[in-house]
Amino acid sequence: MTPTEITHTLSELFGTSTQQLAPGSWQVETPQMRLLVLLSDDLSWLRVLIPIAPASEALPFAQQLLETNFDDTQESRYALHQGVLWGVFQHNCQSLEADDFSTAIEHLLVLHQRGLSESFNQLIETRMRQIIQAAKLQGQSLEATLQTLDRFYEEGLMGEMDQGAASREAVLGAWRRQLERLWSEVEP
């Protein structure tokens, strides 16, 4: 891809939201996101970056993000730099086609839209499976495990001390649904 082709593709995708900052660098900025496209000094490599979250918010999910890099992100990757979690795509310009460039940008936009929610959900499911495994190793049934969680909420070991009854019931309902969904899948 040449700089002219990059400009053309970005303009097709984002219209007037595209700015060329300097030779070999572009920025797309909308109210929802900011995308950077950078060429190496010798114009042989292209890098596309989109900020996802502050690194301090992302670090608790480092394992899930690395697993996602391995399993799901295809040619895009999560990366940490300068205190920010980025979605990154890098490619050799000579072999990059406009369709592949557009697809990579679409994937980065999906990573941005997901934010940390998918990593959070993966972490929660992992922890739920650990709770189920521990309960089964202790010989507890699903109902006994739910009663233990209810007691923990009543005693303030889990949840907020000033959490109202309706809020507590909603949280316990979510616990119940997840435990019921995963209970038969987890072996002690």
Image (cartoon, rainbow, N blue to C red):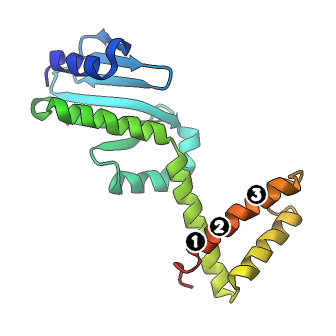
Residue bearing the label numbered 1: 181
Residue bearing the label numbered 2: 177
Q: Give the residue type that dot 2 points to.
A: Arg
State left or right for residue 108 relative to residue 182.
left
> Residue at the location (69% across, 87% down)?
138
- Which of the marked residues, 3 or 2, is nearer the chain's N terminus? 3
In the rendered structure, are the residues bearing label 1 and label 2 in contact, judged by CB atoms less than 8 Å apart?
yes
> Residue at the location (88% across, 65% down)?
154
* Mark 3 nearby-residue class (10 Å; few <14, some 14–19, many ≥20): few
State left or right for residue 33 relative to residue 11.
right
Q: Give the residue type that dot 3 points to.
A: Ala
Query: Residue 35 lies in what quarter of the image?
Result: top left
> Residue at the location (76% across, 57% down)?
170
Q: Which quadrant, please, contains the C terminus?
A: bottom right
* Mark 2 nearby-residue class (10 Å; few <14, some 14–19, many ≥20): few
Q: CA distance from mark 3 to mark 2?
A: 11 Å
Total numbered labels: 3
Asked whether 17 or 96 is in front, the reply is 17
Residue bearing the label numbered 3: 170
- Which of the marked residues, 1 or 3, is nearer the chain's N terminus? 3
Name above or below for residue 111 compared with residue 25. below
